């Protein structure tokens, strides 16, 4: 049966009209005369209250109404006597569609730890917290498509199965139909992938960028939004083996245009969250404050809504890697040995502790860091005239560190080939990519936004496994 959602009902003028609601019991309380059921259908963080006359329905049959049970209720929509809600439903008919045995149902109306909820990730979206997180995830996905649609970008789909390694880090999941015990071998003992399903060695993509560039060099401005896979063995709270990435790519954009776009884009998404997700944001904000109430004042993060407004209202700081290294070298935590990775010399890769120092302590604003040493960045980045740096661009956010990685691309054929040779990247299978530099090459740029990192920021959650329904990470592919 299609009925009005609880979200809609809660803003409907109550005048004793008959309505039907369907949802899951969050909580039941009351006495021998009357029961109050908090019903939720996932459309909103808010429950609708169902008022039940115990005598009418029988004490025995109401025993089946326990937390987690699915109900269909028909009754009268009336103004609520209690505070906190505008209306409630006086039940006339109540059907238990599916029971949830309280002896075994893991989600009970009490505080569960995030670790426990990860173990029952197939049910955790029935909690207020995960309902809010996944509605935010939906809202942000919609806002991303909306932004690009309003700005003349074409939605583009790069393949998930590919033979190339965009980031050159070799952190790929192999795709094969070979029998693992008995793959065909070449004479030298290596596996003969020519006999494999695709006639070559293939893997799951680590980024849609390379094929995105092909699209941009025809359609002007494109963006991808899809899953990417990295067999990186990092068990951190900011890494997933399967994560979603948004990768716009724009012909005729240089690094400055790229920076302007990323700042405008991120601010649009944050504004969208404030305009459309306030109920969930306020819930998440309260949770965060509750979580942090035992921390020292200086260790607490800014209130969630305030933090989002703060990023929105400030210009992002733009500075070069070289300037950042100077700041870090002379910083207090570096001098007093507080950094796990000391910053001694130009050329070192930045760790998240350094990124967060710049953003949270030094500038107290999001930072766009550009012009990194070429040694620590991918082969496709535009080589700067200094011969040492490339036109890279990382966006650093408070609590997150790197949220976006991007660059202007090397559009010169000879320079690109030279860099690939230097880095030992095989040309075989890359001719398609090099063709964009042979035919109608032009300045172009793009970036990748990690969708789950954005969600960490807007939900205030601290573990990336809690902002994707079914996280994939080393030693974990449950559900
Ligand atoms: O910096 P990355 O590796 O850049 C690229 O993949 C480029 N090809 C993007 C481009 O220019 N089109 O990744 C981009 C972003 C990171 O800034 C981070 O937010 C996210 O993707 N990311 C991850 N998120 C979760 N788990 C992981 N293992 C991630 N690795 C990167
Ligand atoms: Mg990066």
Image: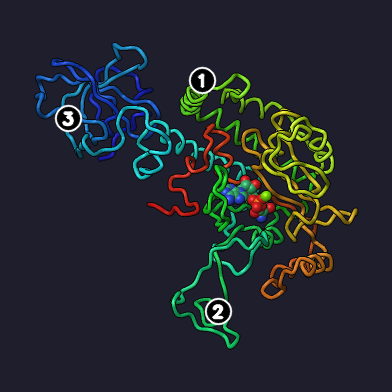
Residue extending furthest toward the right: 386
Residue 248, can we see it? no
Q: Is residue 393 left or right of residue 110?
A: right
List x then y, in percent, for residue 44.
Answer: 40, 30
Residue at x 54%, y 35% (from the top left corner)? 462
Q: Which one is earlier in the sequence, the residue at label 3 or at label 2?
A: 3
Instruction: Name which residue lies at 26% across and 38% down.
Output: 105
- Element at label 1: loop
Residue 98: which quarter of the image?
top left
Q: Does the residue labelled 3 lie within 8 Å of ligand 1?
A: no
Quick check: 462 left or right of 248?
Answer: left
Q: Which disc is residue 193 wearing? A: 2
The x, y position of residue 232, in whole percent, is 58, 56
Q: Which mark is residue 61?
A: none
Looking at the rendered structure, the secondary structure element under dot 3 is strand
Q: Nearer the viewer, mark 3 or mark 2?
A: 2
Instruction: Using the image as rendered, state which of residue 151 and residue 377 is in the foreground.
Output: 377
Which residue is the site of mark 3? 94
- Percent x, y of residue 187: 58, 88
Q: Tags 3 and 2 in contact by the CB under 8 Å rule?
A: no
Foreground: disc 1 or disc 3 = 1
Q: Does ligand 1 reach within 8 Å of label 1's beta carbon?
A: no
Q: Which of 348 and 309 is in front in this view?
A: 348
Alpha-carbon span between mark 1 and mark 3: 41 Å
Residue under numbered circle 1: 293
* Mark 2 or mark 1, whichever is nearer to me: 1
Identify the residue at image location x=28%, y=20%: 88
């Amino acid at each position: 049966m299609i009925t009005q959602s609880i979200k809609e009902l809660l803003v409907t003028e109550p005048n004793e009209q008959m309505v039907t609601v369907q949802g899951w019991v969050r909580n039941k309380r009351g006495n021998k005369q009357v029961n109050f059921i908090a019903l939720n259908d996932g459309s909103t963080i808010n429950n609708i209250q169902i008022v039940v006359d115990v005598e009418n329905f029988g004490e025995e049959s109401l025993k089946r109404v326990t937390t987690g049970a699915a109900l269909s209720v028909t009754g009268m929509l009336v103004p609520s006597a209690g505070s906190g809600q505008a209306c409630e439903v006086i039940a006339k008919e109540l059907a238990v569609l599916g029971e949830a045995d309280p002896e075994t149902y893991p989600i009970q109306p009490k505080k569960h730890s995030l670790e426990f909820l990860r173990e029952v990730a197939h049910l955790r979206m029935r909690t207020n917290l995960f309902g809010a997180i996944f509605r935010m995830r939906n809202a942000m996905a919609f806002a991303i498509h909306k932004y690009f649609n309003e700005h003349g970008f074409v939605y583009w789909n790069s393949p998930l199965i590919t033979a190339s390694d965009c980031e050159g880090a070799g952190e790929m999941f192999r795709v094969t139909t070979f029998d693992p015990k008995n793959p065909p071998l070449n004479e030298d003992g290596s596996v003969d992938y020519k006999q494999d399903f695709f006639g070559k060695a293939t893997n799951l993509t680590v980024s849609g960028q390379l094929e995105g560039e092909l699209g941009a060099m025809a359609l002007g401005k494109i963006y991808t939004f899809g899953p990417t896979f990295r067999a990186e063995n990092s068990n951190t709270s900011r890494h997933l083996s399967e994560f979603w990435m948004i990768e716009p790519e724009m012909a005729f954009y240089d690094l400055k245009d790229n920076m302007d776009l990323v700042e405008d884009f991120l601010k649009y998404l944050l504004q969208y969250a404030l305009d459309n997700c306030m109920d969930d944001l306020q819930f998440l904000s309260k949770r965060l404050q509750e979580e942090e109430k035992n921390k020292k004042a200086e260790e607490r993060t800014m209130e969630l809504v305030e933090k989002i407004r703060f990023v929105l209202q400030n210009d992002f700081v733009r500075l070069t890697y070289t300037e950042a290294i100077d700041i870090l070298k002379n910083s207090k935590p570096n001098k007093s040995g507080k950094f796990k990775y000391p910053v001694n010399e130009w050329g070192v890769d930045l760790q998240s502790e350094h990124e967060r120092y710049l953003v949270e302590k030094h500038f107290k604003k999001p930072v766009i860091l550009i012009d990194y040493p070429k040694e620590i960045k991918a082969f496709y980045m535009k080589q700067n005239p200094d011969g040492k740096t490339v036109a890279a661009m990382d966006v650093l956010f408070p609590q997150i560190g790197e949220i976006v990685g991007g660059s202007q691309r090397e559009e010169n054929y000879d320079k690109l080939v030279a860099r690939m040779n230097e880095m030992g990247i095989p040309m075989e299978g890359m001719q398609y990519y090099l063709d964009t530099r042979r035919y109608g090459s032009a300045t172009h740029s793009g970036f990748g936004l990690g969708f789950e990192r954005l969600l960490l920021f807007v939900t205030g959650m601290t573990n990336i496994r809690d902002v994707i329904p079914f996280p994939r990470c080393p030693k974990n592919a449950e559900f």
